[in-house]
Amino acid sequence: MNRAYKYRIYPNKEQEQLLSSTFGSCRFVYNQILALLAANYKAGIKHLSRFDANKYVNNTLKKEYPFLKEVDKFALTNAVYALENGYQKFFKKQGRYPRFKKKHRAKRSYTTNFTNGNIVVEETYMKLPKLKKRKASVHRRAPEKWKLKSAAISQERDGSYYCSILYEFEHDPAYKLAYRGKRLVKVDPWFPRSQICSCCGALHKLSLADRIYRCGCGAVMDRDYNAAVNIRDEGLRLLRECA
Ligand SMILES: [Zn+2]
């Protein structure tokens, strides 16, 4: 489960320059790889995997164009991967052939990945790879337990900058329920859910073949239904115990 929070950021002049150069470098790498893949495609050469395309950026393009080494490396990798997504859609006939990004029409944005604390979100500032601290208005922060996954930095047409932080929830089911205002109660797996009569509480041994639960109190129930009622009641009992 993913959730994103979008914050306005206020880069200084120097940071604005680096952002501008990152947007440009992503577009440049995207177009360079597209030119290569399109030439391969025309010549009937096997399509490069996203990993090989990324390797080409690191081993060839960065040597030829040293300015690419100055920007966030994740931004460039993500630009290559976005192009590859476009190709996959095209191959599955879900989209048209990827097109070159034009300088003045392309969206000014890039995506970076979280690793080893390289992205920090505090109340008055944010830290992003290569850009160090930047003033930001963080109106609300994500709960501690959310895992930061990536950040998308963009510049709007009016010149303002935004950073959208993508979080992933813990895979803990209790956490997902808590988010919806619910609670998870764990019932002991050895709790004899199939053997208790959910009407009177008496205990009877059942064999696996017995599909119907019959009790001296007169209750006759489907085995699974009886077990489900017992689990619900045990869960409620444990919840009352906690309260
Ligand atoms: Zn009974």
Image (cartoon, rainbow, N blue to C red):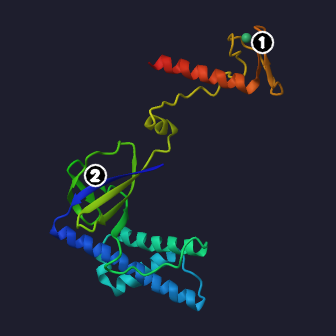
Looking at the picture, does residue 34 appear above or below residue 218? below
Nearer-the-camera pick, 154 or 74: 154
**Residue drawn at (28%, 60%) of the image:** 162
Give the residue furthest to the left: 13
**Residue drawn at (81%, 26%) of the image:** 211
Secondary structure beneath dot 1 equals loop
Give the residue furthest to the top: 217
Secondary structure beneath dot 2 equals strand
Counting from the top left corner in percent of width and height, residue 171 is at 50, 44
- Looking at the rendered structure, the kind of residue marked 1 is Cys
Counting from the top left corner in percent of width and height, residue 53 is at 48, 78
Rendering quarter of residue 8: bottom left
Whether residue 191 is visible, yes or no, is: no
User: Quick check: 113 left or right of 52?
Assistant: left
Bin the neighbour count of mark 1 within 10 Å (Cα to Cα): few under 14, some 14-19, many 20 and up: some
Whether residue 21 is visible, yes or no, is: yes
Bin the neighbour count of mark 2 within 10 Å (Cα to Cα): few under 14, some 14-19, many 20 and up: some
* CA separation in Å, label 2 and label 1: 60 Å
Mark 2 vs 1, N-terminal side: 2
User: Quick check: 80 left or right of 93?
Assistant: left
Rendering quadrant holding ligand 1? top right
Q: Which residue is mark 2?
A: 121
Nearer-the-camera pick, 43 or 50: 43
Counting from the top left corner in percent of width and height, residue 108 is at 32, 71
Beta carbon at label 1 within 8 Å of ligand 1: yes
- Looking at the rendered structure, the kind of residue marked 2 is Val
Looking at the picture, does residue 42 appear above or below residue 198? below
Nearer-the-camera pick, 154 or 165: 154
The quadrant of the image that shows the C terminus is top left
Counting from the top left corner in percent of width and height, residue 101 is at 39, 79
Q: Which residue is mark 1?
A: 215
